[in-house]
Amino acid sequence: MNINSRRGTKQSAARHHSHLDRCIQLFLLSTAAIIVIAYYYFISSTALQSTAATKTSGDHKHDNDELRNHNIRGGTNEVTTTNIQEAKATIGYAITVSGCPKTNASGMLDGAAVLKHSIHLNSIHSSSSQYDYQMYALVHPSAESCATLQLAPLGYQILVRDVPVPLQEIEGDYLRNKVPKNGCCGDKEFVKLHAYTLMEHPVVVHLDLDTLVLKPMDALYDVMMDGVTTHTATKKNKNNGGIDVAFNDPMPQQQPINAFFTRDYNMAHPGMKHAGVQGGFLVLRPSMEVYEEFREIIRKGDFRQNGGWGGMGFGPFYGSMTFQGIIPYFYDYLHPGTGVELDPCTYNNMAHNPRDKPTRNDVVSGNCRNGYNRPELNDECEDCRSRPIGEIFTTHFTLCQKPWECHAQDGDRIQERLCRKFHGEWYRVREDLETSMWKRGVVDLADTDEMTKVRGGRFQPQQFRGFCKGPGANGYIPITLPDSGVLVKVT
């Protein structure tokens, strides 16, 4: 045997064992590094989850810190904090602007700002509500310039929409000729129907600018999304899912509820077959199919001089050719059982006289206006002016006049007492908007001199909170947006 050859084999083996040892060492080091990295990743993840859980539990306090960190800009709702619970759904809230105001422009900017903040205060961001919100402005082309300028900075998504059916395409001669001057806004009132096209939301609420949300309306949204379930039936008015239905009628059980509305009995008159809806409040289920059906109804134009829509008695009355008439025609006649009339004392309360004769010394007289529709209830109608404000979900400033006109409403009459409370709540929401969201100075309502210095007004400070210099529209101090008209991110 060759000795040199044997020696070479031993050297090769030694080199092989040395290489093997290095590989084993490298493997052990790599394994140890992976274990260490995994350990620290597990520890950091646990800490982050614990911190997030702590923040989530802290959110249930619903204090003003969350309001200060909430930023709305460019038509989106951007929450700068991450401690709110996940919303059950996002509700679309829409207003319609059919034209630019000719006088008192505060009605658009100030009305929209305070309305939106009242929605915010009754959403998941600042209350017990399970629902988030998104604001929209359905704007007729003739109002695009003023609406974009005033509403976009507030966080409204501007949707420029023309009437669903051009006037010249309406086949019915009577409707085509008369609708331009019907109601408040003529055929432009049909722009509201574009709310049905907001398909990204399970529920949309259409409100007028002169409304205010006072309480979360989760019960309405729950019923529309889940039906009248055992869960919702544990609330007040358990047979109706906790909802105050007009006349205490039972909630339809056999099919989904696609709309909630109130009727405008203040416009009712003897002999009418159907009362119109109140056009400032409609909760609806978006549907392109429904929207197209409305378009077809308008295009056909079967509105009769003495019989209204389809000759079925949905008109004539104020606004019957447009929104106030076509909505009840759709839900009462064409699709019965899919729309529910709500109690106007709790939803869309306007502090109206329920009877057809004047109220004197708080004593009502005359027949019930809602008895025109329900003769069996001719002498049974609640006076909504006596309803405690804590039970009211939304109010509509029609008979009470607009809050940005500084009406004192301080007479000792049943209507003025409730109107004053409604106006006081509007100014409370405005103050919260300016102090909590825009970080403006908080003032002592009892210190009139300080209030005048900070806000400019000293007229009835407990009621108007420094935003009125005197009675009437000329005494009102309009809202000024922060940062030269753009909502800035609060940090």
Image (cartoon, rainbow, N blue to C red):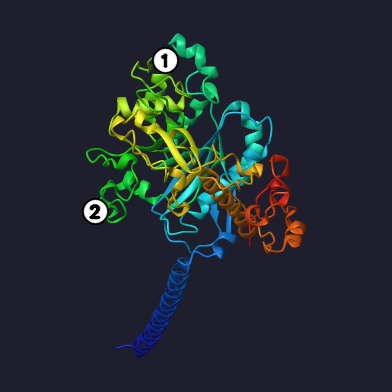
Question: Is 457 above or below relative to 207?
Answer: below
- Nearer-the-camera pick, 407 or 338: 407
Residue name at image x 26 percent, y 39 percent: 252
Mark 1, other Cα within 10 Å: few <14 / some 14–19 / many ≥20: many
Going by the numbered disc 2, the residue's amino acid type is Thr
On residue 343, which mark appears?
A: none
- Quarter-of-image position of residue 26: bottom left
Question: First in sequence: mark 1 or mark 2?
Answer: 2
Q: Is residue 307 visible?
A: yes
Question: Is 202 above or below relative to 35?
Answer: above
Residue name at image x 69 percent, y 40 percent: 473
Residue 391 percent coordinates (x, y) = 42, 52
| Residue ranking furthest to the top | 173
In-image side of 346 versus 361 (left or right):
left
Residue 227 percent coordinates (x, y) = 28, 46
- Quarter-of-image position of residue 185: top right
What residue is shown with label 1?
Answer: 301
On residue 230, which mark appears?
A: 2
Question: Is 78 above or below relative to 195?
Answer: below
Q: In which quarter of the image is the C terminus?
A: bottom right
In-image side of 464 versus 363 (left or right):
right
Q: What whole-number distance in Å separates the C-alpha atoms at marks 1 and 2?
A: 43 Å
Q: In which quarter of the image is the N terminus?
A: bottom left
Q: Can residue 264 be seen in this view?
A: no
Going by the numbered disc 1, the residue's amino acid type is Gly
Q: Is mark 1 on a helix, strand or loop?
A: loop
- Quarter-of-image position of residue 150: top right
